[in-house]
Image (cartoon, grey):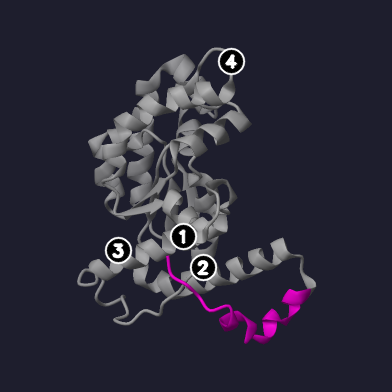
Amino acid sequence: MIKLSFMTFLLDPACFVAPRMESGDLYAFFDERLLKKKAKELAPCLNSCCLFLIGMMGCGKTTVGKVLSEALGYAFADSDTCVEQAVGEIPVAQIFQEHGESVFRDNESKALQELSSKSQLVVATGGGAVLHPINWEYMRKGITVFLDVPLDALARRIAAVGTDSRPLLDFDSGDPYTKALMSLSPLLEKRVEKYSSADVTVSLSKLADDLEEDVSHLTPTIIAIEVLEQIEKYLRGKKKTFNSHFPLDLPEFSSF
């Protein structure tokens, strides 16, 4: 995480509206400005390549992906939605039930192949997409970003919204949190090594510690800022590849 002087924004005349806001709106206002500033400066360095968000179900790939795409001026795609459209406009859970997981995975790979041929696109992938090597060939055409959310936080999120749309979490009645935790644990164990192969890892646990916040209080905007920050660090290490588009001295940014 990087730190930004609060005065940076206060010196901007546009920010004199801030005192009229509620405290929550005030922080959201500055977060939005920081995200836009960061995205504007980093976008040229991406050379129009796609961003592929990977991670467990419920980690926020779709929500954060939409925030990132808007900030960068990119389009957004959800690979699950692409599969649903390809199979006949039916939900993922129904595809698993009526056609089986193999049909879903085959169509998922086809979707990623198609999406990887595009530019200026943020893609939210399915949680299990990382298990198939061919998918990595497609995603390596862009930058892969692992949203690493603590298992406890994932279980709480999923328990809160239900599991009807989560075909791999079809468990009996009982305490939703405990059941979600027990179902997610073996899935994560199976996938975590693959997730760690991402170009960029954004640890929400570390981000929360840096901000002295609970993981549940991290907004999609704050997470998106951290994604861009970690991508910047990644590109600095790859600047020879991006030499014609990557500034030698990028400015430092931060959250509050």
Quadrant of the rendered structure where residue 161 is? top right
- Residue that numbered label 3 is attached to: 234
Q: What stretch is highlighted in magenta?
A: 1-19
Q: How far apart are marks 2 and 3 (CA)?
A: 18 Å
- Residue that numbered label 4 is attached to: 174
Is 31 situated above or below 252? above
Q: Please give the name of the residue rendered at 62% of the width and 70% of the height, measured from the top-left corner.
A: 30
Discs 1/3, front? 1
Question: Of helix, strand and loop, which one carries label 1?
Answer: helix
Mark 1: which amino acid? Answer: Asp
Q: Please give the name of the residue rendered at 32% of the width and 82% of the height, measured from the top-left corner.
A: 249
Quadrant of the rendered structure where residue 237 is? bottom left
Question: Of helix, strand and loop, which one carries label 4?
Answer: loop
Front-most of residues 155 and 12: 155
Q: How far apart are marks 3 and 4 (CA)?
A: 43 Å
Q: Distance between the residues labelled 2 and 1?
A: 10 Å
Q: Which of marks 3 and 4 is nearer the N terminus?
A: 4
Using residue 113 as the reference point, say whether residue 62 is left or right of it.
right
